[in-house]
Amino acid sequence: MNNCAVILAGGEGKRMKSDKPKTLSLVLGKPMLLWVISALKKAGIDDICVVKGYKKECIEDFLATLDYNIESVFQAERLGTGHAVMMAKNFLKRHGGNVVILNGDAPFMDSETIKNSLIQHSEQNCSATVISANVCDPTGYGRIVRDKKGELKAIVEQKDADAETLKITEVNSGGFWFDCHMLLSVLDRIKSDNNAKEYYLPDALKLLLADGKKVGAYIAHCSDTVLGANDPSQLEELNKIAKQKGYTC
C-alpha cells in the first residue's frame, strides 16, 4: 500500500529569537525538520509533502539541498493545523493508502514509533490513529480521553479541559495516521468556531467519530516523541537530551 506523509513546518516561532522558520532550528547541528524527514525515510515513507509558511524560501532552499525530492506547499496564512493540512489536499488526493501527519519541530518522533503506530492503525482498521505518549508533566498538551473500554473518546485541549481531564497524563504528540480517503471526507468540515479562530486537525478525529468511524490511539514507548521547542531554552534542552540519550538524525 502506498503510504505518504505531510510535515507541518509553517511556524514562525517568534519566541525562538531567530530570523528563520522554527523547524530549521538546529538539534545537534541539524535542522529539526531534517530529523523528522529522516525518521520518515527510515520508516520506509518516501512520498513526503512539507507545508511551509513563514519565510517559505528558507524551507525551499533547505529542501533543495537534499539528495531526494520532497514536495512542498505554501500556507499563506497560519490558521491552525487543520488549515495547514488543507493546503496539502491535492497531495492527499494523489495518494491512496494512509498518510502520517507530523509536526516539523518534533525531532524525536522516531521511525519505530511511526512504523509501529501504522501497524496498529492498519490491524485495527482505523480511519485515524493519534500517536500519544504518557508524560510526567502534561501541562500544555491535549489530553487523550478514553472510554471505559479503553477506546479513544476525545482529544481535549488544555484550555478546554476540566479538572478531571487535566489529571490525564496521556497526551497528544501532534502526530496522526489517517486513511487518506477518510481524512479528505472530513477535512473541509473542520470549523474555526473557537477562541483562536483556527482550524484544528484533532477536530478531524471528532468528525470521524461522529460519522461512526473507528479512531484509535497508539501509545509511543518513549515520551520524548512529544517534545518540541518554542524558545531557545527548550531548544537547548532538546540538544541536551539528544546528547545524553545518543539520538541521531
Image (cartoon, grey):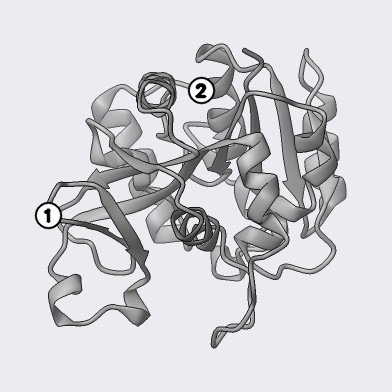
Amino acid of disc 1: Lys
> Splitting the image into 4 quarters, where does residue 6 fall?
top right
- Residue 249 in percent (x, y) is at 49, 22
> Splitting the image into 4 quarters, where does residue 68 fall?
top right
| Residue behind mark 2 | 39
Amino acid of disc 2: Ala
Mark 1 surroundings: few (<14), some (14-19) or many (≥20) residues within 10 A: few
Q: Closer to the camera, 188 or 65?
A: 188
From the image, which quarter does the N terminus lie in? top right
| Residue behind mark 1 | 148
- Residue 5 in percent (x, y) is at 64, 31
Q: Residue at x 70, y 46 (%)?
A: 184
Q: Residue at x 61, y 30 (%)?
A: 34
Using residue 237 as the reference point, say whether residue 183 is left or right of it. Answer: right
Q: Residue at x 64, y 82 (%)?
A: 197
- Residue 95 in percent (x, y) is at 75, 26
